[in-house]
Amino acid sequence: MILHISDTHLGSRRYNRDSREQDVYDVFSQLIDVAIREHVRAIVHSGDLFDVYKPGNKSLKFFVDKVKILRDKGIDFINIPGDHDTPKVRDEVYTQRLLGESLGLIKMLLGDQDPRYVEIDDGGVKVRVYGIRSMSTVFRDNLLNLLNSLKPEGERNVLMLHQGFREMLPYDNAWQLEIGSLPRGFQYYACGHLHSRDTRVLPWGGILAVAGSPEIIREEEIEGWMKNGKGGYLVDLSKKEVEVHKVDVDVRPQEVVRINTATVEQDIENIKKKFNSKRKPILHVILEGDSSKRGIAMKRLSLLTEVAEFYRIYKDETTDSQVREVRAESKGTISELIADYLRKQGYNDEEVKLILEVISKYDSDEADEILKRFAEMER
């Protein structure tokens, strides 16, 4: 049995809040507890262990303390670097090298360097875990060559990847792989990078699983969390058919809410009733209604602090109710269309005449004189 997790982003502190950093640590601790309780042989982490490639001392200490507990229980921690883990400076050292090669706390796989795999013994069943570090779209050919070179030979084989798939991220430059380009011979494809969970049975056998992030990092993950939860996967490789079981963790709730400037107080009361719980949510507010009442509404929004850990204006969709929609006639000459539009804006016939003269004589000496006459009419 292994526990597949990914995209933990240790050290992330969204909105620069201590509580959000702690939320990330809390869900990681829950997953460690699951690994110990379920007596797994290893945790496989498919990238973005930390939020930045140079994590701070707080997140490093937190991780080291947790992994020591796993080591004492005989549980391996196997990891590939994700894009957030990848150094942005040439010749900089992966943090995972420090944790693995120098301290012996984890086992890191890169794919293009030794070791090529980690072998574990799961109740008499030999499982080989292969992994390839995150590679950007620029290095897609290198990635494909690495995948084609893999020749799994164990009784059971797992492949760890941290890449975007075309079938899941169809827009340009967001993906590096197509599912059909994956190598055969693996029973389980442990994937990261995407933050919403997904599992697929592959045509040639085996299961592709995206573990997702165990905490809601960005608001676009809310829909996936509501549908599939957050956490990881317990993977039983002891049988011919791989069994995958979803493991959920308790995350801080988040929701996108709509508040209208005309009904702001009632909207807030409804929200307060809905989230009257011990675990305060993160609220992403879509503000709508009359923009002239926006200032008053913004002051009233402070009432959300009674029930929310944090709120933010996610989108401002307020509009000016005083703005008139003016449409020009669809027929007539250019001058006639302009004249019609100007009259609907409130200009009288004499003013319209002068404006049209300026337009027709913009490159002559007469234009300045006409503008002076127009200015005198405006006084």
Image (tube, grey):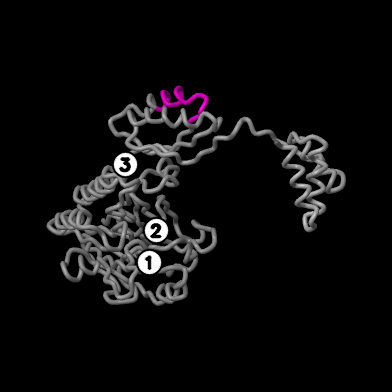
Does the CB distance between marks 1 and 2 fall below 8 Å?
A: yes
Q: Mark 2 points at which residue?
A: 193
Measure the alpha-carbon separation of dots 2 and 3: 19 Å
- Ranked by sequence position, the earlier of labels 1 and 3 is 1
Query: Is there any visible trace of residue 215 in the rendered image?
Result: no
Residue at position x 47%, y 68% in the image: 137
Q: Name the residue under label 1.
A: 134
Q: Name the residue under label 3.
A: 251
Q: Nearer the viewer, residue 74 or 315?
A: 315
| Badge 3 density bin: few <14, some 14–19, many ≥20, Cα 10 Å | some
- Looking at the image, residue 124 sits to the left or right of residue 87; the answer is left
Is 268 colored magenta in this rendering? yes
- Ranked by sequence position, the earlier of labels 1 and 2 is 1
Does the CB distance between marks 2 and 3 fall below 8 Å?
A: no
The range drawn in magenta is 259-271
- Looking at the image, residue 73 sits to the left or right of residue 190; the answer is left
